[in-house]
Image: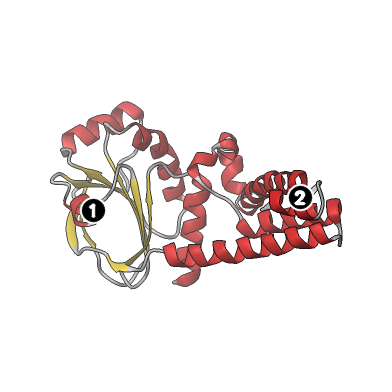
Amino acid sequence: MASLIAARLDGRANRVGWISLLLGFVGARMGFILANIDAFMADPWTMVAIWQGGFSALTGIIVAAITIAIMLGRKPAGLALMATLTGLALLHAGAVELMRPQPRPMPQLALTTLSGDKIALGTAGRPMVINLWATWCPPCRREMPMFIDVAQGSNIPVLLVNQGESAAAIRAYLNQQGFADKGIVTDVAGILGRTIASPALPTTLFVNEAGDIVDLHAGEISRAALTAAIHDLQRTS
């Protein structure tokens, strides 16, 4: 679109379009980092881990708009780029809403913690975060120290439900790594993963107070994304 505007109105529009796109991308990332600065200070390297997600679309749009305004002002090419940016922003907002997963009931299951306590999943009354993991899964192993740390300071229960491994194997892994067993849940048959059709390990489920899964993150999750989702659960509960 910028190329078309450049061809018809102002040759600089193409260059300005690419610059605003780049600065908007950086601004979107920086906006997310600043909004979750405590989480990023705990794991500074994740600031560059853009593959884990985490962007503030509003901040990115504002930065892109300011870039266009500074470089082209109210010239016809600048107004055309602003209109294009507005259209893309509306398209993005619509796509996000359409792709937002619909809440679905959490399967009602009775599982056992590693310490032997029974725990009921899928009952209304309290929001929770559930992470599906396994000791053989590299990304599960990478994110586990972070999950345990976040769980210790969270007002919402954070459960780490192992998939398909025995209590002895899980306990051996925890002892080897020096991890406590608080919040570790066994699911030897992997029932939960199959019931929700988990696409991969790790998978993190965010369950609201009504007992519905309101969000699902497949793959490794950053501390910032995890804590932001927990705050969202707290606000809506």
Q: Position of residue 127 (x, y in %)?
A: 37, 65
Toward the left, the furthest residue is 189
Instruction: Name the residue type under label 1.
Output: Ala
Circle number at residue 206: none
Q: Is residue 62 above or below residue 175?
A: below
Task: Name the residue carrying label 1.
Answer: 197
Q: Quadrant of residue 68?
A: bottom right
For image coordinates 18% across by 49% down, the residue present is: 116
Instruction: Identify the residue at horizontal 49%, vertical 63% (top origin).
Output: 95
Inspect the image, locate mark 2, and give the three-letter code of the amino acid beneath it: Ala
The residue drawn where x is 82% and y is 61% is: 76
Q: Position of residue 15 (x, y in %)?
A: 76, 43
Left or right: 161, with 165 as reference point? right
Task: Give the CA separation, mark 1 to mark 2.
Answer: 48 Å
- Pointer 2 residue: 6
Neighbor class of circle 2 (other Cα within 10 Å; few <14, some 14-19, many 20+) is some
Q: Residue 200 occupies which quadrant of the picture? A: top left
Q: Considering the image in quadrants, where does the C terminus appear?
A: bottom left
- Indicate left or right for 97 with 116 as reference: right
